[in-house]
Amino acid sequence: MLNGGALQATSMTMRAFAFDNRVIARPCGNYFWPSTGGNPVPTALVEKYDDRNRNGVRDPGEAGLSGWQFQVERIASKYGDQGTGVVDTVITDASGLVRFAFNGAGPGTYAIEEIGQDGWASTTAARQMFTVDDGVGSVEVAHLRFGNAQTRADLAKVDFGLVDPPQRLEAHTTAQLTVRAEIRNNGPADVAATDTVDVTTPADCRAEPAHAEAVRTLAAGESAVLEFPVQLTCDQPSFHPVTFADHLAVTTPGVQDPILDNNTLAFQPVFAVYDKADVQLAGTALTCPPRADVTQAFDCTLTAILTNAGPYGPVTADVTFSLQPPADCHADNTSGTAQTLSLPIDRPTVVTSLWRITCAQRSFHDINATASAVDEHHSG
């Protein structure tokens, strides 16, 4: 510095911009020193993840999604020196991350939008906007999180049946049944599954409940066993077919089951229903002529009184007669060995059977006669 004609040493402050060992001097002209080095470039981080519980937040255990494309678009340039439109397309890495550097992309308003994939639905905004200011330097101007969830889940019926079904039912008596269903989620999405059981009975039977539902949340690959209690009551003795049908459905909004053939199972057991009817035989008698000639046929009448003492009625009964004559005699039933009757309660019915007998020897012949009755209903 020249001072009174003499040079004197003094100091002065020179301000500069510095980044990555590069310098831009502010006074005395602008220049870079050295000529190589990094420039301060802002970045935006994109994070893509599998939002399995569909809550729009990345929770622990939710993995990143690789290979997902995003478009970076300039909405507006702060100084109007750059045009609008798509700036670049970036792809997430193995951990579901990708960082976009605004190297050459100036300050302004930007948007990053995911490019959708089949079988996935967004759980967050698919297009997210942010601003890049001037002079921010090498900073992360945005950390954008994009969640997606699977839109398909294959639910399947694994098994469906009764637990220890009864061998017989008693009329007017309620039987406690247990219906068991095993279901599985083959994935890929985690979903809520609704399992429905419907019971169809003959007119004289009642199932309570006739319709039942259970809801379970199943992760991909998870199974569950469901049990449905059913009370079954039938009023008439017979063989009763009862149909149990089970249907499984996805109830998570936005998720579909791609395979419906394995969602329904049904079976139809036949229950033997028994009632009580006391069928009684009394007054069995055999009436024959007082005498007959040797080798000459004679007719005898076998009668019995049949009564249904209840409590179930009317009941259908098969009545069978038989004779056991001596060895030298031969007996033929001329009216049929069995008869079928409908027996009301407490109304005695006389049943008759006709027999033609021939004996070869003179004697006093003892003839044994029997009658038996079996009801055709399931009664005891």
Image (cartoon, grey):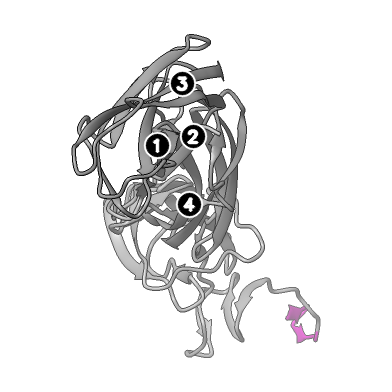
Q: Residue at x 51, y 69 (%)?
A: 64
Upstream in the sequence, badge 2 or badge 3? Answer: 2
Give the residue at mark 4.
Answer: 161
- The magenta segment: 1-9
Judge depth for marks 2 and 3 and give the one in front: 3
Q: Quick one: SS at disc 4?
A: strand
Judge depth for marks 4 and 3 and give the one in front: 3
Q: Are the residues tagged 3 and 1 within 8 Å (C-beta)?
A: no
Give the residue at mark 1.
Answer: 239
Q: Are the residues tagged 2 and 3 within 8 Å (C-beta)?
A: no
Badge 4 amino acid: Gly
- Give the x, y percent position of residue 334: 20, 33
Q: Are the residues tagged 1 and 2 within 8 Å (C-beta)?
A: yes
Disc 4 to disc 2, C-alpha distance: 20 Å
Q: Is residue 289 magenta?
A: no
Badge 2 amino acid: Val
Disc 2 to disc 3, C-alpha distance: 24 Å
Give the residue at mark 2.
Answer: 273
Upstream in the sequence, badge 4 or badge 3? Answer: 4
Q: Is residue 47 above or below residue 199?
A: below
Disc 1 to disc 2, C-alpha distance: 6 Å
Q: Quick one: SS at disc 1?
A: strand
Q: Which mark is residue 367?
A: none
Badge 1 amino acid: Phe
Badge 3 amino acid: Leu
Give the residue at mark 3.
Answer: 306
